Amino acid sequence: MSRMICNIYWMEMNWLVYIAFDTFVMNWSLQLILSTAEFMRVTIQEAGNMDAAITSKFKARATIAINGEGHEVKLDEEETSNFRDRLLPFVIGLLRTAKLPAVLRIYRDTLTADMKTAIKTAVEELLRVLCAQPLDSDFVAGERVVDTDGGSSSLASRLRSLPPESFVQLLKAIFMIVQAHLARASEVKKTIEWIICHLDDHYAADSVAAAIALGAAAAETASEADGQITTFSQFSPPSNFSRGFSIHEKGNDVTTMSHLSRNFRADILRENTEAVFAACDAAHGRWAKILGVRAPIHPKLRLQEFLNIYNITQEFITATEKIGGRLGYSIRGTIQSQAKAFVDFQHDSRMAKLKAILDQENWAEIDVPDEFQTIVTSLFCPKSGTTGHADDDSAVTATSQTEVVQSSSDPSMVDAGVPNISHNTEQSDSTSTHPDSTAQSNDTNSRESGRSNPRMLSFGGVSYHMVNCGLILVKMLSEYIDMNNSLTGLSSEVVHRVVDILKFFNTRTCQLVLGAGAMQVSGLKSITSKHLALTSQVISFTYTIIPEIKRILFLKVPETHKGLLMLEVDRVAQDYKVHRDEIHSKLVQIMRERLLVHLRSLPQIVESWNRQEDTDSQPSQYARSITKEVGLLQRVLSRTLPENSLNIYLMQSSR
């Protein structure tokens, strides 16, 4: 009987213990759930209030600073202290139960999802405002998608329909929202690091140390159980904890607990850091996706419009990398890819435009507008500190015309990039010296004499006569320099494009003038000495500014790329020099050809000298013809070429 009573007693006691244990587990689980929920509320949900404030501010069209510093979100010292005090008890509770690493993983996923949702919500709400604004008059017609179905057009199509200015405003708002979330995440990261590592003199230092020890032991027990659900006994504190948790009773225990605590701390800090990393990656991914939607549009923008997008993206990258501590490879790749596409598109459009202008060029002199002289003065004229180099360039420019004497008969002048004029000598000569051409030139000169001298383009103390295509090239070169200065990461690409356009201009000009191609494409009746002289001026000017172009462009080029690029630029400069010398040789050749034509009548004149009676006091026909043509050539060229160069050509042609 007594044994039966004892058994019943122990059964009741076990049942009471089981009920008590079950109640404790339920309360503990409930507390854990509440702690986790409160942790999420404090760390994430309160940041959502800032999203609404930013969106409302934007909808009210308040000014949003483009500078990244204007977006910075920081807590002051009092707010930081209050935030730490709010987070401390939840962290201690999660440390005791060894659940902080797991909660931080949940926090990372929640933070990432919340970041994506906040960006998407902001884009949807702001697009309603931006798409309702009137279309910018400068925006390319046909590129804006009109929402005719009551707002059901896709988010992507509405993003593509935004004018550049509105799209930049949208990016500013996203920038502020992302930075608000990342600032909160960064503060959570710093707070957890402070609790785990820097709580030495705080009133809760002992509690945190005990919680870490408990959590480390619990985590080790759970690990040994191969991930199975741990029992209450596994999570129960050691017997000596109730007496003050002295871990110095045994040397072995001290070493073991210290090792477990270090591993536990490292696990927490790793998960803590990964949460911010993941949030930054999510923000970078969303920003890159938004840019990618508009990838077909951005290359067609004007330089300043694209730069606004490019610069705010760079500021976004810098700000988020500063908070997150991780490089944004995806977003950097996206913006660099779009910048390269922009340079490629701009280059292709300029090449097509220049080809069309060259094919329509009539090679007539025009007045140089002030705009182009301002471009040359601001970009290429020597600044203080570079006077010596500029003077050298000017000296080369002033004396380069005389080099024709030594180089005109050198066969090495004909470069692969410049067509050999010998193939078109007969056609060019016949058209240049035909009596009709002479009359045409004479009439042109008579008309020109009735008006004032045209304005010329000055550089390095030398003035140059210009034609339309030469001024267009100057404008394009200034635009390439602007791209080079603004998109410094693509300086090497810009230099390649400048080399391409200089090569094309030189080669095509040679084909049209020296090769007489302008007679077919432009409808010129002949290629006259006036055309040759004007072409010489344009080529000489371009050849003269190439050193300055190289100096300006190479300020931004990385050292590793400078060697090969310098060789390419120097090769182009040599091609221009060859082309210029070929034109000068052609002018000399024209005069020599006319001299040879008139020399055929010289034997008849010699025979007349032997006559005893010569009553004709007038100069011979030979003398009159050759004098007339030399005088005509001198008058035509003197209006275009420098005096010293003209004298050299006339002397060279008489040899």
Image (cartoon, grey):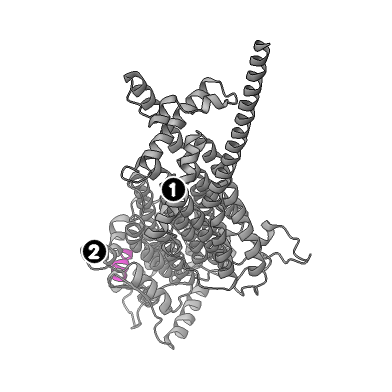
State how far apart marks 2 and 1 are (Cα): 34 Å
Q: Is residue 406 left or right of residue 308?
A: left
Give the image quarter of residue 293: bottom right
Residue range (magenta): 646-654
The answer to whether residue 650 is magenta is yes
- x, y percentage for residue 401? 30, 64
Provide the secondary structure element on which disc 1 rests: loop
- x, y percentage for residue 102? 54, 36
As drawn, the label of residue 416 is 1
In the image, 78 versus 485, the foreground residue is: 78
Question: Which amino acid, mark 1?
Answer: Ala
As drawn, the label of residue 386 is 2
- x, y percentage for residue 500? 46, 54
- The answer to the question of whether label 2 and label 1 lie on touching residues, with beta carbons closer than 8 A, is no
Above or below 251: residue 639: below
Above or below 586: residue 412: above
**Dot 1, crowdedness within 10 Å: few (<14), some or many (≥20)?**
few
Above or below 73: residue 264: above
Q: Is residue 460 left or right of residue 222?
A: left
Q: Considering the image in quadrants, where does the N terminus appear?
A: top right
Residue 186 visible in the current orientation: yes
The answer to whether residue 162 is magenta is no
Is label 2 or label 1 in front?
2
Q: Is residue 53 left or right of residue 464?
A: right
Look at 49% across and 50% down and name the residue there: 336
- x, y percentage for residue 527? 50, 67
